[in-house]
Image (cartoon, grey):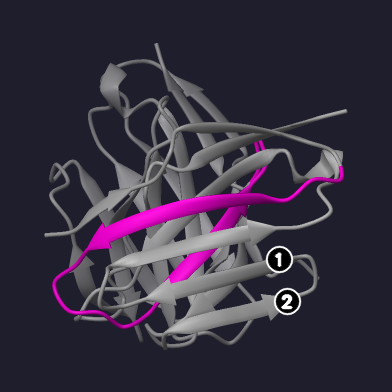
Amino acid sequence: GQNIDQPTEMTATEGAIVQINCTYQTSGFNGLFWYQQHAGEAPTFLSYNVLDGLEEKGRFSSFLSRSKGYSYLLLKELQMKDSASYLCAPLGAGSYQLTFGKGTKLSVIP
Amino acid sequence: DTAVSQTPKYLVTQMGNDKSIKCEQNLGHDTMYWYKQDSKKFLKIMFSYNNKELIINETVPNRFSPKSPDKAHLNLHINSLELGDSAVYFCASSQGGLFWQYFGPGTRLTVT
């Protein structure tokens, strides 16, 4: 089975940097996705890591350590529109089997 | 030019009824999914189809029956609706299983 753990809620200030952590246990591993979901909307793809290290994409970066079963999403220069839930989703051995964590609700305050 | 579309967006119905939700993608993807997101916002996969064939069928009551008439469509039929079926149902698609998934806008189902 798969076990995913991420904080339920976080609050950060506009312009600041926030790191959202995710630990996971999967049956096999084919990469890890981060999705963003605004309230009442569909999840949208943010990043994908399959090898260890940091992937940077504008204000967002995602890090993976496969040996530790650990990933984080780093958001820089926070904007009010970044207030959303961030879902960690490892891809298990069978592929197609994307399991989502419960998500971290990020609130950005002025 | 919507990539993944679902109809209806909202569905309110009574217990015991049968209803269907339709999903279409125009991305040319070969894999489609149905997810359920409950009131606690937990997004859980229900089914996955690859090239019209069922490849994932999680522990879902057999009142739920997916149907894929072609690669671009995956419909979800629900029989004998129960209160616990109230949730947002998301359709998604991807090219194969190792790529990110595009989600539809969701169908909010309310069973009264």
Q: SS of the residue at dot 1? A: strand
User: Mark 2 packing: few (<14 Cα in 10 Å), some, or many (20+)?
Assistant: few
Residue at image point 18% right, 62% down: B57
Label 1 amino acid? Phe
Question: Which span is picked out in magenta?
Answer: A15-41
Q: How far across and down, in percent of the image, does residue B85 sit?
A: 31, 28
Residues A13 and A49: in front is A13
In the image, residue A29 lies in the stretch drawn in magenta? yes
The image quadrant of residue B4 is bottom right
Marker disc for residue A57: 2
In the image, residue A32 lies in the stretch drawn in magenta? yes
Residue at image point 73% right, 76% down: A57
Q: How far across and down, in percent of the image, does residue A71 sit?
A: 43, 65
Q: How far across and down, in percent of the image, does residue B71 sit?
A: 45, 82
The quadrant of the picture occupied by the C terminus of chain A is top right
Label 2 amino acid? Lys
